[in-house]
Image: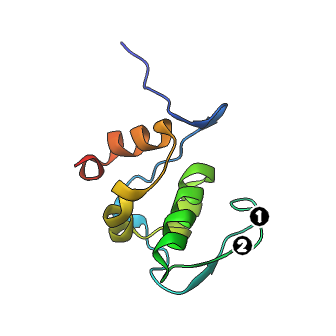
Amino acid sequence: MTSPVVHLARPHRPVVVAGSLRELTGPRHGPVELPLRLWWGPPRAFDLDRPDELLWMYENVLREAVRAEELRSYLHGPTLVRVWPRLNLPRGVRAAWEARHRTLSR
């Protein structure tokens, strides 16, 4: 019997992956302010109608989330699928999400 692979977002931090892309019901448009725990630099608001800011926010949430609720609150499933190829993510984050959600690895 083999142990499940644990992917790391960074040293000593396992990647949190949503059980389903459908549960990601976060905002799709407009300004979103991340809590200090997810983004500690000013400014903390991201305008999701600006493509670069949307990518930047998604990258930070995917890298920093420690609870599935954070993913559900700030990510939107169809948007994640659409921008996935353009996200700059640590290898562990990308591998964990693609292992769980095959649609992302296409």
Callout 1 touching callout 2 (CB < 8 Å): yes
Residue at the image point whose x is 74% and y is 74% from the top: 43
Residue at the image point whose x is 72% and y is 68% from the top: 35
Q: Quadrant of the N terminus?
A: top left
Q: Dot 2, how many residues are within 10 Å of its Cα: few (below 14), some (14-19), or many (20+)? A: some
Residue at the image point whose x is 40% and y is 38% from the top: 95
Q: Is residue 42 above or below residue 37?
A: below
Numbered mark located on residue 44 in the image? 2
Is residue 29 in view? yes
Numbered mark located on residue 94 in the image? none
Of all residues, the one furthest to the top in this rendering is 1
Is residue 69 in view? no
Q: Is residue 99 left or right of residue 28?
A: left
- Callout 1 amino acid: Gly
Task: State the residue position of label 1.
Answer: 41
**Secondary structure state at the residue bearing disc 2:** loop
Q: Quadrant of residue 56?
A: bottom right
Q: Is residue 11 left or right of residue 89?
A: right
- Distance between the alpha carbons at the discs numbered 1 and 2: 6 Å
Relative depth, front residue between 38 and 84: 84
Relative depth, front residue between 30 and 27: 30
- Callout 2 amino acid: Arg
Relative depth, front residue between 74 and 56: 56
Q: Is residue 50 above or below residue 2?
A: below
